[in-house]
Image: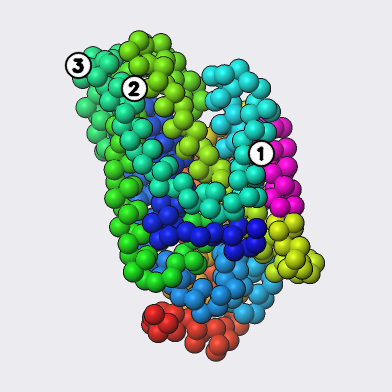
Amino acid sequence: MNVKKLLIGKTSKLEISFTSSVFIAGFIGMVVLPFYLYLFGAGVFWEFLGVAISLILVWNLESYKLMRYAKKNRKIVTVPGYFEHRFKSMSYVTRTLAAVETAILSIVIASFLLKEFAFVWNLITGISQTTLIGIVIIIICCGLGVFGMNFISKVSIIKAIFLTVGVLTVAFYMFFRVGSVELVKNMMATNVMGSVSEYLNVLFHNGELLSATDLASLISIGLLASGMPFMLGLFFFEKEAKDISHGKMYMIIFLLIFFVSAAFFGAVSRGYLYPQELTNSLSGYIYMVFYSIRENEGGGVIISGIFLILISVGFMSAIEGAVHAVCSAIYEDIVVEGRLFVAKKRNEKRNIIITIIITGVIVFLLAAYLNATDISVILVFIAALGCSFSPTMVMSLFWKRMNATGCVAGLLSGLIAVPFFKYAEVILIQGSKLTLCDILGVNSVIPSMVVTYLIIILVSLLTRKPDEEVINEFMDVRNRITE
């Protein structure tokens, strides 16, 4: 095991494409999309349109530039490492800050996902959550410790095919089991707000007509995908522009087929679960779907097993990516390049394994001792990570005047803005304290993204211009001289 094997392994352009796609779509598409569509109706389409837009923008606009920077400097293998190279001044500060943010937020995200995953399996199997958390983290850490990135990338294509075929199999089983007429009748009897036609109308959300601010809020949630360090880091290892172009095509085809399939599954599940009471609990929803299918004769046991494996793959894809991001940030960016100690080449394998073990223990302890989780809490931490890294990365790639101080300001402001806009009750109206999100009628992502962009611009303009060397390299990358 060496750093290169840990970070990228031996992957093809096809594997890198599906690795990034499954990382984003596995949990969001297999777990979140069906649940939200079951609960609120087809209006959640706009969230996943945002995901698709985000990934298309990343592959079209950011990927080529990240690849060129990495080709110019072979030492760039992580997003924090890119920030150090991009901004020569304060390089140690930018790299360390980006790595610490990546590690802390990814640990929390992995722990919350692991807790929810264990809770689902506990409901179904009765095995203790702590035991389940331990089993999953041992599997992931052993996989990364032995195979490195290959543990994730080599099975990405298999995961993508299984997710798409599997969710369609389960959806059609439920559909034909009940029939289209009965499904519509069941939907009408499950307290659908408005009508079934409105429930299936993308312009309605939970029975209410979506306004412009509602649409913007839903789409903005999907845009968080552009701030995931694990996915962005994959582009440092692409060799040629044509590889990215091919990867982009595979990604678009997969996302289109998979999201449509998952949406069909979510809509069918609303009618299929009748007469069970509607639940706003993700784990409760998964539990109900599993046992409703399992109780049927004629393949119910097999289909329920497929469904449970699909859910597991969705959770595991996100957890694996988060744990990998933590290990990369701690070892490559904080320990070795962060100069905490001089790592000898002959001890590299041992040091990487120690890093993976420490990461696994931290994630295990946090997940094991967390109280009951909620999907909205997970999304807050994902939002903090996305709003911190997405604007900072975009500005670093497209604005030559941005400097190291602006990079630091962007990373910090995105991190602080999300909880501030979501939770800080700063305005008193008619005796009630309201947050700025309540006043604006949007979620925390939009104002947080806007504030982060503005702070990056303001701080960069008020501080020293980048060195000529930095600007020349930026222009070189922008003009595609290196290709």
Name the amino acid type tagged 2. Answer: Arg
Say whether disc 2 or disc 3 marks the residue closer to the N-terminus. Answer: 3
Res. 243 image quadrant? bottom left
Residue extending farthest bottom: 468
- Residue at which label 1 appears: 138
Disc 2 to disc 1, C-alpha distance: 36 Å
Which residue is tagged 2? 270
Within 10 angstroms of label 3, few (less than 14), some, or many (20 or more) residues? few
- What type is the residue that disc 1 sits on? Ile
- Asked if labels 1 and 3 touch by Cβ distance under 8 angstroms, the answer is no
Calculate the distance from the C-alpha at mark 3 to the C-alpha at mark 1: 47 Å
Label number found at residue 181: 3
Badge 2 or badge 1: first in the primary sequence: 1
The reply, left or right, for residue 342 in relation to residue 203 is right
- C-alpha gap between disc 2 and disc 3: 13 Å
Q: Amino acid at mark 3?
A: Val
Q: Residue at x 40, y 47 (%)?
A: 157
Q: In terms of secondary structure, where does tag 2 sit?
A: helix
Residue range (magenta)? 353-371
Q: Main secondary structure of the magenta part?
A: helix
Residue 263: tell me if it is visible: no
Snapshot colouring:
rainbow
Q: Is residue 150 magenta?
A: no
